[in-house]
Image (tube, rainbow, N blue to C red):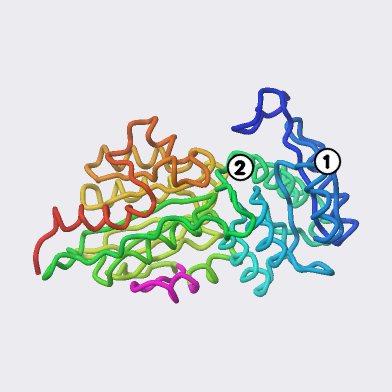
């Protein structure tokens, strides 16, 4: 098998330099073996705590850092906060995804980490392979993909060591036209991956209470989607929840696909009802953006609006093309505001996108389109 292509932004043939920060000797060895087993990356150093990592970053100039959360001398969250203030760089969190770990990792993404990987338990690593898969092989593949994604990501520079990392543009808060209400058949569907947790926060916090129902796929493990939905719900004017099976899609509510299932929909009277499926992954993902978008094309057709946000890979591009062909209006986040311009780029390349907009404007564009074609109450 040929070696994977070099990460975007790297010189041809250059291998991504990775620094591993974890207090467990076993995990440092495991991560080193996984990284060095890929042809396009190599470990340049390992550190047992953030104090040692600080000196190694200066000496080794790694391209990507993998970072644990719970460590001696300084926890990973505080180290990440300081790192992103004084020397921003791509960081992949490698953490145990307990309830507390989920909250901490979401905080890390808010502080600027590019992505995260669930640290496997020792029992998972020792469990025999099932069919063609094993926990260790799945973890290795995911970690390598996330490191490649991090290398390709856009990390804003910090030119002044005394200044905070530049903040993303604030979203414009949106108010619907006076007297306007969504029709029962109106629907918004959104897909995102790498960088999507913060992108979705930007979009959803801009929206007013009287939006149509919103269905969301964000690539995320099962232990995260509930916490993520609750976090968004505490910040937004709309209600945000993890999607269940057979729920009636209500206006003013966003439904986040659970990390273990595809999210689809079916007609229910004049509106819609959610469906969850544990069918095989699509584009290596479950939930998959393509699955949601294809369902929206088939069920909602021209009454749907689709938005594709930052993310690595091509998931959602084919589904967005199906939506456009079914008469839906489609929108993609622009390259300048994406953490990783992968999924939107693929959708644009397929000519599946009606409009491209910066992240801070996407909420405005969604509501402008709805009000332009909507009916007054």
> On the image, numbered disc 2 is attached to which residue?
149
> On the image, numbered disc 1 is attached to which residue?
44
Q: Secondary structure at mark 2?
A: helix
Q: Is residue 284 above or below residue 204?
A: above
- Quarter of the image where the C terminus is located: bottom left
Location of residue 202 by image quarter: bottom left
Q: Residue at x 38, y 72 (%)?
A: 236
Residue 225: % across, % down = 53, 65
Residue 262: % across, % down = 48, 55
Earlier residue among tags 2 and 1: 1
- Quarter of the image where the N terminus is located: top right
Q: Residue at x 76, y 58 (%)?
A: 120
Q: Is residue 40 above or below residue 232?
A: above
Of 187 and 343, nearer the camera is 343
Residue range (magenta): 230-242
| Left or right of 136 on screen, residue 215 | left
Q: CA distance from mark 2 to mark 1?
A: 18 Å
């Amino acid at each position: 098998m040929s070696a994977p292509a070099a990460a975007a932004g790297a010189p041809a043939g250059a291998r991504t330099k990775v620094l591993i920060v974890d207090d467990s000797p076993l995990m440092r060895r495991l991560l080193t073996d996984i990284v060095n087993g890929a042809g396009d990356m190599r470990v340049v150093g390992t550190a047992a705590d953030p104090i040692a990592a600080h000196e190694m970053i200066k000496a080794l100039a790694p391209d990507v850092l993998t970072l644990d959360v719970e460590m001696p001398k300084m926890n990973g969250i505080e180290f990440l906060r300081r790192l992103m203030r004084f020397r921003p760089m791509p960081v992949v969190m490698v953490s145990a995804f307990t309830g507390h770990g989920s909250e901490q990792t979401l905080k890390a993404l808010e502080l600027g980490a590019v992505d995260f990987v669930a640290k496997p338990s020792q029992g998972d690593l020792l469990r025999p392979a099932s069919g063609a898969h094993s926990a260790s092989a799945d973890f290795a593949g995911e970690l390598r993909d996330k490191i490649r994604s991090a290398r390709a990501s856009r990390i804003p520079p910090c030119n002044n060591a005394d200044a905070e990392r530049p903040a993303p543009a604030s979203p414009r808060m949106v108010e619907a036209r006076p007297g306007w209400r969504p029709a029962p058949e109106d629907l918004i569907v959104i897909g995102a991956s790498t960088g999507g947790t913060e992108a979705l926060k930007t979009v959803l916090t801009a929206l007013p209470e009287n939006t149509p129902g919103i269905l969301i796929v964000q690539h995320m493990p099962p232990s995260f989607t509930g916490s993520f939905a609750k976090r968004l719900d505490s910040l937004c004017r709309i209600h945000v929840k993890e999607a269940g099976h057979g729920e009636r899609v209500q206006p003013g509510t966003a439904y986040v696909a659970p990390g273990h299932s595809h999210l689809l929909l079916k007609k229910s009277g004049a509106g819609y009802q959610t469906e969850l499926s544990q069918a095989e992954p699509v584009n290596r993902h479950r939930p998959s953006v393509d699955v949601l978008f294809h369902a929206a094309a088939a069920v909602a057709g021209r009454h749907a609006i689709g938005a594709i946000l930052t993310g690595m890979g091509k998931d959602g591009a084919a589904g967005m093309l199906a939506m456009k062909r079914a008469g839906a209006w489609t929108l993609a986040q622009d390259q300048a505001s994406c953490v990783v311009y992968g999924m939107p780029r693929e959708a644009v390349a397929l000519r599946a996108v009606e409009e491209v907009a910066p992240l801070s404007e996407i909420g405005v564009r969604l509501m402008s389109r709805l009000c332009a074609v909507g009916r007054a109450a």
